[in-house]
Every structure is written in C-alpha cells, then in structure tokens.
Image (spheres, coloured by chain):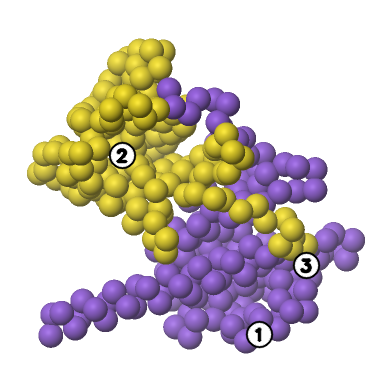
Chain colours: A purple, B yellow
Amino acid sequence: MQWDETFHVPVAQRAAGVVILNGQGDILLVREKGDGKQRKAGLWHIPSGTVEEGENPQDTALREAYEETGLRVRLLKFLGAYLGRFPDGDLILRHVWLAEPEPGQSIAPILTDEIAEARYVTQTEFDALYAAGQIRMYHTRLCYEDARREVAAQAARRDHRRAQES
Amino acid sequence: MQWDETFHVPVAQRAAGVVILNGQGDILLVREKGDGKQRKAGLWHIPSGTVEEGENPQDTALREAYEETGLRVRLLKFLGAYLGRFPDGDLILRHVWLAEPEPGQSIAPILTDEIAEARYVTQTEFDALYAAGQIRMYHTRLCYEDARREVAAQAARRDHRRAQES
C-alpha cells in the first residue's frame, strides 16, 4: 500500500452550503440573528450548515438552502471544499456548490429564529461588508470568488462553442 | 468576522476521482503500471488524479475516468472529500463522486503507459487485495464503503417511496 491509515487526516466537522448568483453576479446571503453574545450574530454568510451524522453533503446543501432562504434549489456544479481549523485544533471542511433556485419562488427563510434576512448582495456591497467585518468568514469570500470564476469560465466555453458552430 | 484568514487551512494538492459500481456492487478499479521503483507500481485504485491549476474537481473526475478507463461517465452524487497528509506535512484533498458509465461503451484505458488494466473487482476480491497490501490507499477503501452506503440509502429511500405510493 502506498498511503495507509497513517496518511489519513480525520475531519472533526463537515458543513455544506450553496452560492446562488443572479444574472448580475449578485450573491444570495443570509444574515444571522443572535443576541450579540454569539460571535456569528448579525453576520452575513452563504446559506449553509452542519452535515448531520449519515447525511450526504449534497443533501445538506439542499436542506440548508431551503431552511435558510425558503428556496428549493438545483445544484449546478461543485465549487470547492474549504478547510478550516478551530482554535482547539479541530478541522472543519465546508463543501460548497454553485446552485440556482427552481423557477417561480420567493425568498422566505423557514428558520426565522436563526435567520434575520436573506437577500441578494451586489459585489460592491459584499466588498464593503467584508471590509467592515460583517461577512462571517474568509471562506465566504473565497467561495464567492470561486463562483464568479466558474460562471466566467462557463460563459467563455459557451462563447467558444458558439463561435465554432457559426 | 467570526472566522478570518487565520482559520483557513491551505491544501497543497487536490485530486478527484470516481467510484463506479455495477449492479452487483463490484467496483471498477485500475491497476497502475510502473517499474517497481514507484511506490504505486502495481497497486489498485479508483480512477482518479490530480486537479490541475484552474480545473474544477468535477471536471477532473470526468477527465480521469475517461483517461484511465476509456469510459465517458455521468456523476451521480458527491461521496466525500478525503483528507491526507504527506510525510512532508503537505495536505492533499481527494474529491470522489459516485458515477455511472454512459450506456454502450467498453472499458479500454487511454493512458496505456500508466494503466496496466481496468476492471470490476468484487467486494470479496477487494477485501483480499486490501489485506494483501495491493490497494493503493486506505482512502480507496473508505470511498468504496461510502459508495455502498450511499447506494443502500438510495435503495431504501426508493423502497420507502414505492411503499407509500402503493
């Protein structure tokens, strides 16, 4: 065997979520409620949450999107798995997909005890929120960047195909 | 911000691959060629390989499946991201999807310089190869186990739906 069990690194916690962009490249974010004692209180993040025992991360992403925005979504493409380390040393891996809402729905969070609001944020507004420390994670920014890169790459491939076909 | 850049853990290398099961739960594996000096020479693994710069892991999985087995496949579901640490401390993250071949193809590896053979291996044979140190990674076993669990969960959900509908 080339890489046995000693090569394996256990991950203490898994999370999954979605990046949903509208046609203008704005990103759908949710703002956490909280009593101000929690470190995430009031901060903006993508719809996402913990992968439960025995749950597939893909199913977590769909479930969290629905609970936090009220939208049934379709996963378009895997964006990345973002690794983080808590202060106690435990690792967390967050799986993120590019997704789009099924047509004809309105944004209306189900978990109203946890989510104060859910809405599209422009890139300019995102950058301002980030600079002000109002975005929940560095990873929130990374997956937004990766999503814009993926959408741009898809558009470039589509243009290339059309140019070849014409 | 709750989790800033100091929370982020960089991953030095990314890989992606596929678990393909047939109707009997046998797994499609590839056996590496090699001159015997390489530690992976002669060992069995799922079709998989390195995510190239700017490549999406989903696209890597499709590309590697084709190069190592000659099969065009469809990704059915994300199975997991398996984290490993090389002896030098660098982290590698391997993304694995459950996949199925598009109909009407034969197994015929393209990278014949690297791949000695590709074929379905029964679970009994897999266990024997594993015990004999002929499976390339502990992660190869983990993702096979996760794939069988996912397929069993899908079958249970299907049976449950049918029972409700009847």
Q: Is residue A112 left or right of residue B122?
A: right
Mark 3–mark 2 Cα distance, whole angstroms, equals: 40 Å
Question: Residue at point 34% right, 56% down?
Answer: B59
**Crowding near pointer 2: few (<14 within 10 Å), some, many (20+)?**
many
Q: Callout 3: helix, strand or loop?
A: loop
**Residue that numbered label 1 is attached to:** A125
Q: Amino acid at mark 2?
A: Pro
Q: Which of pointers 3 and 2 indicates the residue nearer the eye?
A: 2
Q: Where is residue A5, by image quadrant?
A: top right
Q: Is residue A41 visible?
A: yes
Task: Name the chain letter of the residue that bears numbered label 1.
Answer: A
Q: Secondary structure at mark 2?
A: loop
Q: Amino acid at mark 1?
A: Glu
Residue in the picture at 11% in, 43% down: B105
Q: Position of residue B153 (x, y in %)?
A: 43, 35
Taking the spot 83% from the left edge, 61% from the top edge, the residue there is A39
Tell whether A109 sits left or right of B142: right
Q: Secondary structure at mark 1?
A: helix
Of B133 and B71, which appears nearest the observer?
B133
- The chain that hosts pointer 3 is B
The residue wearing badge 3 is: B1
Task: Quote the CA–CA distance across marks 1 and 2.
Answer: 43 Å
Q: Amino acid at mark 3?
A: Met
Query: How far across and down, in percent of the image, does residue B106 sit?
Result: 11, 39
Residue A50 in percent (x, y) is at: 64, 49
Residue located beneath label 2 in the image: B47
- Which numbered marker is on residue B43? none
Neighbours of disc 3 within 10 Å: few (<14), some (14-19), many (20+): many
The quadrant of the image that shows the C terminus of chain A is: bottom left
* Nearer to the camera, B149 or A142: A142
Is the residue at mark 3 from the same chain as the one at mark 2?
yes
Q: Is residue B136 left or right of residue B122?
A: right
